[in-house]
Image (tube, rainbow, N blue to C red):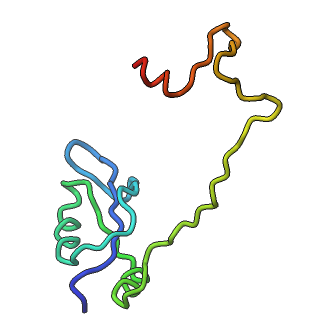
Amino acid sequence: MSQVGVYRLYKLARVSGDKFSAQMGKQLERDLHVITNNYAEQINSNSELNGLMYEKDEKATELYLSGKPFKQVKEYTSFEEVKPKGRKPKKTGELDVNNVEVNDQEELNNEE
């Protein structure tokens, strides 16, 4: 048996005063992360008082111990710049809608 595992941390619902319960509800506080089994057991033994509970994910633990990634890696699409249609960018010296002269970016930076 290994000394570490992959766990999810849940925040428990308050029942009354200083007491918490998992039966009343729980909310995910922190997704999959690696901690020692002893620490998780210690927190879970006092879950009625501290309002926290760890649940071990066996599949993720097996993946972690075999050296494979245990979290789902998100893939993002490539970024494409969106240009407004039908409007031409204003040139330096032109007036905008509010009759204010459009300046270069360098001039705007120097004004600050």
On the image, the x and y values in percent for residue 27 come to 40, 54
Number of numbered callouts drawn: 0
- Residue 85's place in the image compared with 57, above or below, is above
Q: Nearer the viewer, residue 96 or 43?
A: 96
On the image, the x and y values in percent for residue 43 come to 20, 65
Q: Quadrant of residue 90?
A: top right
Quadrant of the frame with the C terminus: top left
Q: Is residue 48 left or right of residue 27?
A: left
On the image, the x and y values in percent for residue 104 come to 56, 25
At horizontal 51% and vertical 70% (from top left) the residue drawn is 73
At horizontal 23% and vertical 50% (from top left) the residue drawn is 19
Q: Residue furthest right?
A: 86
Q: Nearer the viewer, residue 64 or 1?
A: 64
Quadrant of the frame with the N terminus: bottom left
- Residue 28's place in the image compared with 91, above or below, is below
At horizontal 26% and vertical 44% (from top left) the residue drawn is 16
At horizontal 62% and vertical 18% (from top left) the residue drawn is 102
On the image, the x and y values in percent for residue 13 come to 34, 50
